[in-house]
Image (tube, rainbow, N blue to C red):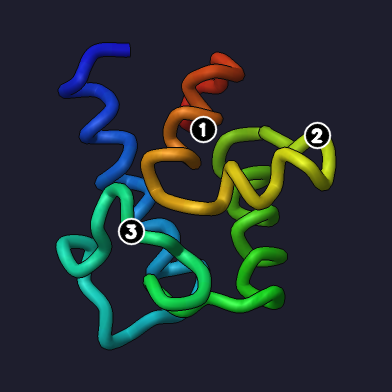
Amino acid sequence: MNEQAMNKLMADLKQQIIDQLNMKNIKPEDIGDEEPLFGAGLGLDSLDVLELIVLLKQKYKLRVSNAEDGPKVFSSVRNMAEYITANNVQNA
């Protein structure tokens, strides 16, 4: 995937995360590509990760295969985009 396509995917993911988690006070440009999604970064919690799992399943027909992958996949928007790209899943 070229850089332009990766940037579009990351921009789409940011908006999808905001919509999925009902984050009314956050704009896509407020979320950094490498910013941690949990803890000190965006401040998401364990309930939010369940929403992100649902997002990947509904939008990208993708499941995070095991518990070891989860923390890495959901650590940043870039890592989510790379996981989607690595699994050759097209946006639905």
Residue at the front extreme, as displayed: 40
Q: Position of residue 7 (x, y in %)?
A: 22, 34
Question: Are the residues tagged 1 and 3 within 8 Å (C-beta)?
Answer: no
Callout 3, which amino acid?
A: Glu
Question: What distance separates the C-alpha of mark 1 from that of mark 2?
Answer: 19 Å
Callout 2, which amino acid?
A: Ser
Alpha-carbon neighbours of circle 2 within 10 Å: few (<14), some, or many (≥20)? few
Residue at the bottom extreme, as displayed: 25
Q: Position of residue 91 (x, y in %)?
A: 47, 30
Res 92 label: 1
Callout 1, which amino acid?
A: Ala
- Identify the residue position indicated by label 2 in the image: 65
User: From the viewer's perspective, is 28 left or right of 83?
Assistant: left
**Which residue corresponds to the image point at 24% horizontal and 57% vertical from the top-left?**
32
- Identify the residue position indicated by label 3 in the image: 35
Q: Please tell me which of labels 1 and 2 falls first in the chain.
A: 2
Residue at the right extreme, as displayed: 66
Single out the mark in the foreground, 1 or 3.
3
